[in-house]
Amino acid sequence: MDNIKEGSWLKTSCGLRSPVGSVLNGSEWQVASQISDIPFIDHDYFGEEIYNYKVELKLLGVIVDFNGNYQVVTEHLKLPSNLASLTAEAILLIMECIKHSNVPIEVLNLLGGTSFLKTNVGFKTPSECFLYDPVWGCILEVFNGLPVIDHKFYGEKIFSYKDELKQTGVVVDFKDAIKKFASLFEQKASAASINQKHVTA
């Protein structure tokens, strides 16, 4: 049994692999396929009959259903070059992976520097974005055009990922928002000063 488990004989979308860690594809993996190059058992090669052997495949170490296997998604993470093309479900899955698995710091840095979050003013990088908060969110209206994450696009579930969004650089806390506002005030005051000098000149 151990020899069968460890040998690289199972045909998958990533070539011949050991059954351990290989995945039996199903509809629940559809969203994960947008962000991860998961080693799915080659359905074209084995045919529909392969789904009749879920119990046996599981004994060999094959993952036969999603069931919260975020680490599998993370281990084979392969983000597209255009992250803004991802569906809302895919972005929420990335947040789930950050929450439940060990996402490499390189991936967090990549996310932090990419304009992939949909806001009220288009797609922005996390460090440019604010997550609306019902307690202090009204302050966001002081400035025109602040990028607030589009919770209508992502759904109410986006608010459950405050910690994960913060890891990518999104402003989610009042104290961080105040720092950002202070910086914006300084920029606007400086710009107003320069404009005034130009007018008087």
Image (tube, grey):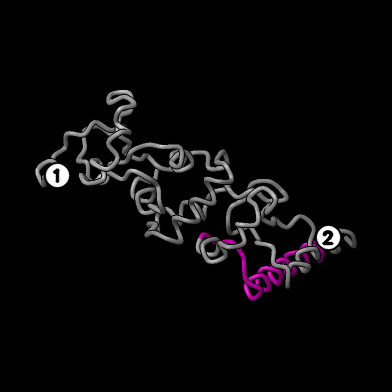
Query: Is residue 191 visible in the rendered structure shown here?
Result: yes
N-term mark: 2 or 1: 1
| Residue 193 lies in the magenta stretch | yes
Q: State the extent of the magenta-drawn residues as a range.
A: 168-195
Residue 56 higher or lower than 142, as above or below: above
Q: Amino acid at mark 2?
A: Asn
Mark pair 2, 1: CA separation: 71 Å
Judge the density around disc 1: few (<14), some (14-19), many (≥20) Cα neighbours within 10 Å.
some
Which numbered disc covers residue 6?
1
Which residue does the numbered mark 2 point to in the structure image? 195
- Left or right: where does residue 61 sit relative to residue 26? left
Question: Residue 12 location, x and y as percent?
Answer: 28, 33
Q: Amino acid at mark 1?
A: Glu
Q: Secondary structure at mark 1?
A: helix
Q: Residue at x 73, y 58 (%)?
A: 146
Question: Residue 164 location, x and y as percent?
Answer: 51, 62
Locate the C terminus and report the quarter of the image it occupies.
bottom right
Residue toward you, 20 or 120: 20
Magenta stretch, main secondary structure, is helix
Q: Residue at x 35, y 49 (%)?
A: 72
